[in-house]
Amino acid sequence: MNSASTFGAVLDSIADFLFTAVILFKLIMIIKLAFWMLIWLTLIVIIKITTLLIGFKKYHSFAFLHTYMNKITGALLFCFPLFYVALGIVPTAFMLLGTATIAAGEEFIINLTARKLNHDVKSILRKSGKE
């Protein structure tokens, strides 16, 4: 139908957030992660929470962004079991945590520098949500 709404964008982001949180919680309980992985994951969570707080204070709304890097991170997390079996935990962790770090940093910078909230911003290099 080629329709979009702010409510739909926020609802989609909340669903993505809950999916990620549940998957991470389940994986942390099942897979033994090295201490450095837990520290790295904690730093990403801190960046994401800080970004949400900045966005909420600045825009009075949940500032989840639909960037390409956030989408890639979600896809990698979804494929985590395949990568884990094929590559092992260390290469998979570097790939997933590295991508998530870039996505979190990009979202932080966009929310910090943008004048108005645009949930559909694609990347820091392309601030327009229109294609």
Image: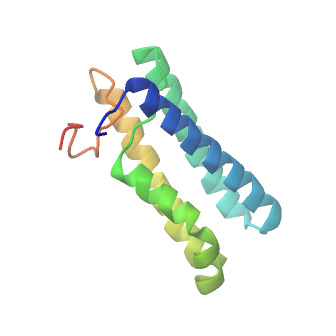
Specify the farthest residue to the bottom: 86
Task: Judge from the rendering whether residue 33 lies leftward or rightward of residue 81; answer left or right.
Answer: right
Q: Is residue 82 above or below residue 13?
A: below
For the N terminus, give its image quadrant: top left
| Residue 63: image location, x then y, percent | 44, 28
| Residue 85: image location, x then y, percent | 65, 82
Task: Judge from the rendering whether residue 91 lies leftward or rightward of residue 26; answer left or right.
Answer: left
Query: Between 117 and 51, which is closer to the camera in this rendering?
Result: 117
Specify the farthest residue to the front: 1
Which color scheme does this rendered protein use? rainbow
Residue sitting at x 60%, y 85%: 86
| Residue 108: quadrant of the picture | top left
Residue sitting at x 61%, y 55%: 40
Query: Between 6 and 30, which is closer to the camera in this rendering?
Result: 6
Q: Is residue 120 visible?
A: yes
For the C terminus, give its image quadrant: top left
| Residue 62: image location, x then y, percent | 49, 25
Total of numbered circles in the picture? 0
Query: Between 22 and 44, which is closer to the camera in this rendering?
Result: 22
| Residue 117: quadrant of the picture | top left
Residue sitting at x 73%, y 67%: 34
Q: Is residue 63 visible?
A: no
Specify the farthest residue to the left: 131
Q: Is residue 80 above or below residue 123?
A: below
Task: Judge from the rendering whether residue 42 lies leftward or rightward of residue 67; answer left or right.
Answer: right
Q: Is residue 129 above or below residue 38?
A: above
Q: Is residue 125 above or below residue 90?
A: above
